[in-house]
Amino acid sequence: QVHLVESGGGLVQAGGSLRLSCAASGSIFSIGTMAWYRQAPGKQRELVARKLSGGSTSYADSVKGRFTISRDNAKNTVILQMNSLKSEDTAVYYCQIWVVALSRSATDYWGQGTQVTVSS
């Protein structure tokens, strides 16, 4: 059993910054890809940033140069640093972590979601 806990959302003014964190715990053998998605009201969930276990990263065009994804493998944690926030960044943010369990089976797990609201 694996459990993800997200933290760090909130209300911020446009131009401000927020830092989201997502920690995995439980029966973990290793961690694979870590990613952040977001879903705004009335819109589909979209990929914001992804970081592979080997270190390579990718970002949505809308956040390039403003958001940074990082991972702390020792703590099974993925972080999303969000700078220069815009009103269009308002959404519920979800982390996704691929976990290889002690049984060696791989499964993706999702965080509970954290609200980010950017006021203009």
Image (tube, helix red, strand yellow):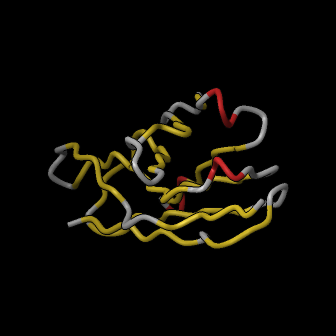
Position of 104 with respect to 31 (left or right) is left
Q: Position of residue 11 (x, y in %)?
A: 68, 72
Residue at the (42%, 64%) spot, across then down: 113
Residue at the (33%, 56%) spot, across then down: 110
Q: From the viewer's side, name the closer residue of 5 and 47.
A: 47
Q: Position of residue 103 (x, y in %)?
A: 15, 51
Tell me if residue 36 comes above or below residue 60 in the rendering. Answer: below
Name the image quarter holding the N terminus: bottom left
Q: Position of residue 17 (x, y in %)?
A: 78, 60
Q: Position of residue 14 (x, y in %)?
A: 80, 58
- Residue 54 seen in the current view: yes
Tell me if residue 6 comes above or below residue 54 in the rendering. Answer: below
Position of 57 with respect to 5 (left or right) is right
Position of 18 with respect to 36 (left or right) is right
Q: Toward which corner of the image does residue 90 lie, by quadrant?
A: bottom right
Q: From the viewer's side, name the closer residue of 35 and 101.
A: 35
- Residue 57 seen in the current view: no
* Figure label count: 0
Tell me if residue 2 comes above or below residue 44 in the rendering. Answer: below
Residue at the (82%, 49%) spot, across then down: 84
Name the image quarter holding the C terminus: bottom right
Q: From the viewer's side, name the closer residue of 51 and 94.
A: 94
Residue at the (82%, 60%) spot, across then down: 16
Tell me if residue 106 comes above or below residue 93 in the rendering. Answer: above
